[in-house]
Image (tube, rainbow, N blue to C red):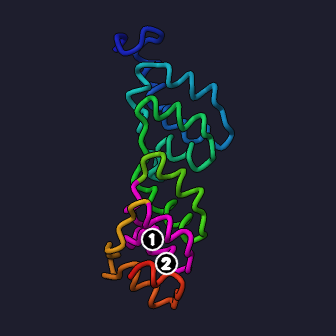
Amino acid sequence: TSEDSPFFPPSVCLGLTHSLLALNSFFPSGHEEAIKFLLSQPAVRKWVNAVDRWGQTALNEAVSNDHEGMVGLLKSHGAIVSNSSGYDLCDAAANGNVDALVKLQSCGIELCLGDYDLRTALHLASCANQVQTVSWLLKSGAPKDVRDRYGNTPLDDALRECSKDVIPLLQ
């Protein structure tokens, strides 16, 4: 309705709400002014957590593309990350990228999220013998008794992959 936005008629508001999904495509190019404009529209703000066809929200994209200023702006408008962030956690953990894990956690991503096999960041870091990453995950509250869809814990994975430096941390 026209009450949703004092700036635009209802037909334009509808277009803007649908275009909020375009926020996701703006992030790789860093179109911050366009994002700020969209977020300034009341009719659009209520769609700040819209999910695109890949399961990503605008905040997911801001985090993935290292747009720290936009992360803060989106969070100030109530943005959250989608559950697809488990893949990002797992990728960062498998590669020993603690900085990425810190960034993801600071955006509200829970360390217990997993991938399609319910394998968590701790599972992947354990398999890859990423000692520093496993240590950080445990200190940050990642559960070590979580089971993937095959019933394996991170310790089971470390034992299977002979990740000898990680095994003591998980026992």
Disc 2 packing (10 Å; few <14; some 14–19; many ≥20): many
Label 1 to label 2: alpha-carbon separation: 6 Å
Where's the N terminus, which quadrant? top left
Residue located at (47% from left, 19% from top): 41
Q: Kindly indicate whether the residue at mark 2 contacts the one at mark 1 (C-beta within 8 angstroms).
A: yes
Q: Is residue 110 above or below residue 130?
A: above
**Is 122 in the magenta?**
yes
* Residue 112: image location, x then y, percent: 37, 62
Please, which residue is most extreme toward the right here? Answer: 29
Say which quarter of the image contains residue 2: top left
Q: Which residues are magenta?
A: 110-139
Residue 44 falls left or right of residue 69 = left
In this figure, which residue is indicated by the disc labeled 1? 122
* Residue 101: image location, x then y, percent: 53, 58
Residue 24 falls left or right of residue 77 = right
Check disc 2 and give the amino acid type: Ser
Q: How many marks?
A: 2
* Residue 67: image location, x then y, percent: 62, 40
In this figure, which residue is indicated by the disc labeled 2? 126
Element class at badge 2: helix
